[in-house]
Amino acid sequence: MPALSPAQLFKCLGDETRLALSLLIHTEGELCVCEMTHALQQPQPKISRHLAQLRACDLLQDRRQGQWVHYRLMPDLPNWVLATLDEATAGASSLMGEARDRLAAMGNRPARQTEHC
């Protein structure tokens, strides 16, 4: 598989929802779909569609745990991609702050999954 180019990365992140998902996952490490729908206040089908596009770009990997699907960044992303996500996270701190606040209000991960997923 060819390496991800800057043009491909920016094309994949060119949608506000895909960018927000990528930044949330980058910040949190791993999230399930229900956590992302709650954090971004978007319907599950929309979130799932954008997650599928990010997987197709080779930015995300998923894992199943029972009925839940969890997403994380691909472990072998080049350093320049991670640096780009770091800078984008810093630049979008006010936008992402609300989403992270909603995640925090869900409680810790075991409680989130019990109550919200």
Image (spheres, rainbow, N blue to C red):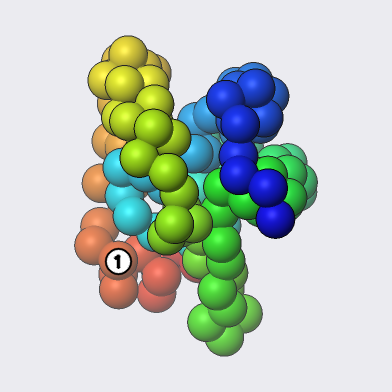
Tell me where residue 71 appears, x and y as whole percent: 51, 60
In which image quadrant can residue 23 be found?
top left
| Residue that carries the numbered disc 1 in the rendered image | 109
- In the image, is residue 108 above or below residue 81? below
> Closer to the camera, 46 or 52?
52
Give the x, y percent position of residue 47. Answer: 66, 44
> Which residue is drawn at the image coordinates 33% and 55% (left, top)?
29
| Residue drawn at x 30%, y 73% as measured from the top left | 110
| Circle 1 residues within 10 Å: few <14, some 14–19, many ≥20 | some
Residue 55 seen in render: yes
* Screen quadrant of the N terminus: bottom right
Query: What kind of residue is marked 1?
Result: Arg
Q: Is any atom of residue 48 visible in this view?
A: no
Q: Which residue is drawn at 52% across and 82% down?
A: 65
20 vs 52: above or below? above
Describe residue 19's horizontal placement relative to residue 113 as left or right.
Answer: right
Q: Residue at x 31, y 21 (%)?
A: 87
